[in-house]
Every structure is written in C-alpha cells, then in structure tokens.
Amino acid sequence: MTGHDICHQPYTSAMPIQPRSASSAEEQLSVIDALIALPFPEQEGQSKTQHGWGGPGYHIAVLRESRDFWDAPDPETITAAEEELEADLTALVTVLAGRWGSPTVVDLWPYLGLDNPDYPDIEEAPEPLGSLCNLAGSMQMWQVPSTGRWLGLTIGQVDRELPFELLAAVGEVSTLPK
C-alpha cells in the first residue's frame, strides 16, 4: 500500500525529477542554503525550481537519490541504499546542529489525516507537510533564525520500486503545529 492509497491529501504522482543528485555534503548544504534564501513561488500549484519544486510557502529538493528497485534486488541491496542516504542525512544533521542546535523530530504521520477515521473531511495539511507525509514518517526540523522559515530533512520513498530520496524541505513557520 502506498501513501497515495491511504492519504487524504491530494497526491501528485508526477513529482519533478531532480536531474542529478548532489554528490557531496558541501553540495547538499549549498542546495539547502539556496532553498532557505529562495523566494517562494506565488502561483498556486507546483512550480519547478532550480533544485526541485515548490509552491506558495514552500520548497522541496531531492538532495540525493538511490538507485531504483524495479528489478527486485535482494534485501541487502535495498538496505545498503537506504543506509547510504542515512549516512548523508546524519552528516547534514551534524553540520546543521552546529549552526542552529539540535533538530526537533516532527512526526509526519498525523498529516496523513488517518488519526480520526470518524472525521473523513479533515483539513488538508499545509505544504510541504502534505507532500512529505506521503513520502516519509518523520523529519528532522529546525526553525531557521531570522527568516520565518523552517528546514526539514528526511529520507522518503514514493513507492517500493522507486528510489529512496534524501529530501530537504523549507516552509513557513506558520505551517508548523503550535
């Protein structure tokens, strides 16, 4: 079952594809810094950006991508691919914690809207949380000082045949739960 099957959020299966992954921590940090500084698109819907895609109040970028799994590789191959991205995530968290302190872990599950099955007409999660909840279970998050923005990092996967992705998301602080 994919996030698309269970999520009350609208889901776009045509997420823009990152032409190439950032291969080093320095490149990944450069993309993160660019996302934080980049103005948000004003038009509704997804807009392609230099590093990924965004919309009013958010940006999402694929920092690094594993291989795909269409050929049903052995479990060790899948685990190795995920562990490689986890190592990149750990390195980024270490550097960013030096800048802004320890991150907050944000559980993305509640944004799926499945916590209250008796209330199917729940409000949509704001972006980028609505997109991220389809891809990952949690994210490491910092409120970026003096910007009114937050930065989230996570590893996600659209479906089990598709690559794991190391994702960076930037959103407006007002989209975070109080």
Image (cartoon, rainbow, N blue to C red):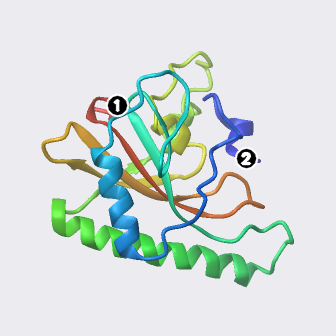
**Label 2 element class:** loop
Q: Residues within 10 Å of mark 2 (few under 14, many from 20)?
A: few
Q: Residues within 10 Å of mark 1 (few under 14, many from 20)?
A: some
| Residue indicated by mark 2 | 2
Q: Amino acid at mark 1?
A: Thr
**Label 1 element class:** helix
In percent of the image, x 71 and y 84: which residue is there?
76
Residue 105 vs 57, above or below: the answer is: below
Residue 56 vs 19, above or below: the answer is: above
Residue 89 vs 159, above or below: the answer is: below
- Quadrant location of the C terminus in the rendered image: top left
In percent of the image, x 33 and y 65: which residue is there?
29
- Answer with left or right where residue 143 lies relative to residue 118: left
In percent of the image, x 52 and y 73: which residue is there?
85
| Residue indicated by mark 1 | 175
Q: How far apart, in angstroms, are the residues tagged by discs 2 and 1? A: 25 Å
